[in-house]
Image: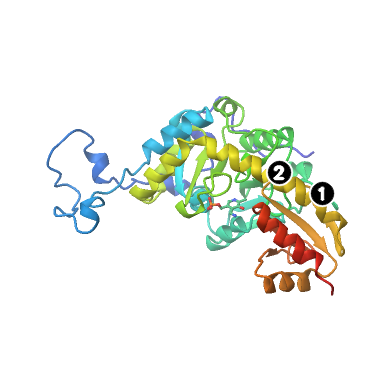
Amino acid sequence: MTKQRNSHLGGHLASDIFPIRKHLHKLKPYRNARQDFEGQASIWLDANENAWGGAHQGAYRRYPDPFSRDVRQELASLKGVSADAIFVGHGSDEVIDILVRLTCDPASSKILLSSPTYGMMAVSAAIHGVECVDIPLQGADYQLPVDALIDAMYQDPSIRMVYVCSPNNPTGTQWSTQDCQRLAKVASEQGIMMLLDEAYIDYAPRPSMAMDSFWGEMPTLVVMQTLSKAWGQAALRIGWAIAHPEFIDWMDKIKPPYSIAKPVQSLALDTLKDPSLLQKTIASTHTERARLLAELPGLQGVIHVFPTDANFILFRHSHAEQLYHWLTTHGIVVRDRRHEVSDALRVTIGTADENNAFLDALKSFNP
Ligand code: PMP
């Protein structure tokens, strides 16, 4: 391993170690009306809202809580972290975008990642004119190249962010806690933000990396999760980051003022208050996943079934393209991943009936 390029932690304040773009230190964040006056009042004439109300009996005439405080509080107690360590965004996709805008300078900063992985990271980088340094997953079983990623963080001072998805989409497996911690420690030492995307964490065997206690040793670690997967609320567009409170403060400074709609905040709150449904769907997903994993390898044309810790299975098929079209003629749509992994299709775990239809169609495929 090569020499360290710098060491940010020695005696510095936490604020010095976050990779915040220089010009943002001078930013005067937008202050909305609800920040200027937070007390009690009976007549609100400060935010240019409509006094008569309009449709829906006026239920939506007021702007929503700009910081989704109730949702943050509920997430905090569920996740065992403090509420000031949580940022709520319009889906994880908005969280990714905000993190790039906060840390990366167009044309000069770089983002480190290992393909194949969730595509929106590279797209978000491209939108912002930020280059991705790709050190692909290694070997036939697509392992995370931890040592090479660490070397790159030491060697390339333009890397501002490292993206790790665990369980990884589209390959499916969760990386070891030890590997993630090694990466997060080096990233923090080097003043690089590490985004750990845990969109599929609720299906995975090992617990989340989000813990208040980590921010002593790994202050630049940002863990991202979502309501879109195991919680089953993709249409609400709610994702969140769990990170050092000072970093969350930075995210709040650059987010759009009233980004989460009021009905979405209350639906998200209702969702989080009933985790029993979450446990039920995780159990059903695991049962169906085990059934598909047992059946798929024996089917004609299936070359390889990747191990998975998520709610999908990546598999390689000798006639993947034809199979994809065959399935659509049966009204079944899977995801074609051949541009990332040769011969590969990705199937999301469905209900028992949906999976039976998928298996029946696959069994009747005869190219
Ligand atoms: N991360 C990963 C790994 C994903 O697969 C997805 C969506 N498929 C997202 C993030 C985006 O999630 P959200 O719906 O919260 O924007």
- Of the residues shown, which amino acid type is indicated by label 1? Ala
Above or below, comparing residue 269 to residue 213 in the picture: below
* Residue in the image at 17% along x and 47% along y: 46
Which image quarter: residue 344?
A: bottom right
Which image quarter: residue 367?
A: bottom right
Camera-side residue: 81 or 154?
81
Q: Look at mark 2 in the image and give the residue it sits on.
A: 287
Query: Where's residue 227, x and y in %?
Result: 52, 46
- Of the residues shown, which amino acid type is indicated by label 2? Thr
* Residue in the image at 66% along x and 66% along y: 333
Query: Where's residue 203, x and y in %?
Result: 65, 41
SS at badge 2: helix
Query: Where's residue 115, x and y in %?
Result: 72, 55
* Residue in the image at 47% along x and 52% along y: 237
The quadrant of the rendering that contains the N terminus is top right
* Residue in the image at 62% along x and 52% along y: 111
Horizontal side of residue 178 vs 300, given as left or right: left
Q: Look at mark 1 in the image and give the residue it sits on.
A: 294
